[in-house]
Amino acid sequence: MLQTLRKAGGSLVMTVPKAFVDQNGLCEGSQVELHLVGKRMTVEAPTRPRYKLADLMAEMPQGLPSVEGWDEMPSVGLENG
């Protein structure tokens, strides 16, 4: 794929193809990793961590936190509706 470099301030910029953006779930502000080897530059979208509920729960020191008096609080909306 041929790209044209453009000047922006003191830098040169190029666009990222929409297919790459969509495939990797990128948006404005996303960070990517650049790998430079000689005349070659590759762009890698970092993988996002995948969490499992069981793993997250195992990290909690005393299980789910509880709020004293929570069950006795009156309804304030459509909780019982």
Image (cartoon, grey):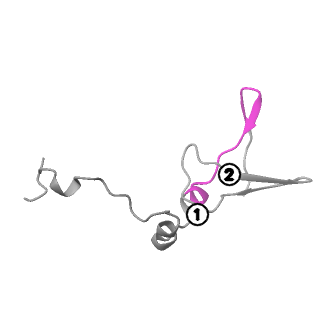
Q: Residue furthest top?
A: 9
Q: Nearer the viewer, residue 59 or 30?
A: 59
Residue depth check, mark 1 versus mark 2: number of the one nearer the observer = 1
On-image quarter of the C terminus? bottom left
Label 2 amino acid?
A: Val
Give the mark nearest the N terminus, 1 or 2: 2
Q: Residue furthest left?
A: 81
The stretch of residues the image draws in magenta is: 6-21
Q: Nearer the viewer, residue 46 or 23?
A: 46
Label 1 amino acid?
A: Pro
**In this figure, which residue is indicated by the disc labeled 2?**
32
Percent coordinates x, y for residue 50 in the rendering: 54, 67
Q: Nearer the viewer, residue 71 or 78?
A: 71
Left or right of 70? Residue 78 is: left
Q: What is the distance, in whole Å, between disc 1 and disc 2 at their CAs?
A: 15 Å
Percent coordinates x, y for residue 61 in the rendering: 50, 63
Disc 2, SS: loop
Does the magenta run of residues contain 46?
Answer: no
Q: Quadrant of residue 22?
A: bottom right
**For the residues bearing labels 1 and 2, Cβ distance under 8 angstroms:** no
Which label number is shown at residue 1? Answer: none
Percent coordinates x, y for residue 53 in the rendering: 45, 70
Q: Residue furthest bottom?
A: 54
**In this figure, which residue is indicated by the disc labeled 1?**
49
Q: What residue is shown at x 15% (from left), y 54% (from top)?
A: 72
Q: What residue is shown at x 16% (from left), y 51% (from top)?
A: 73
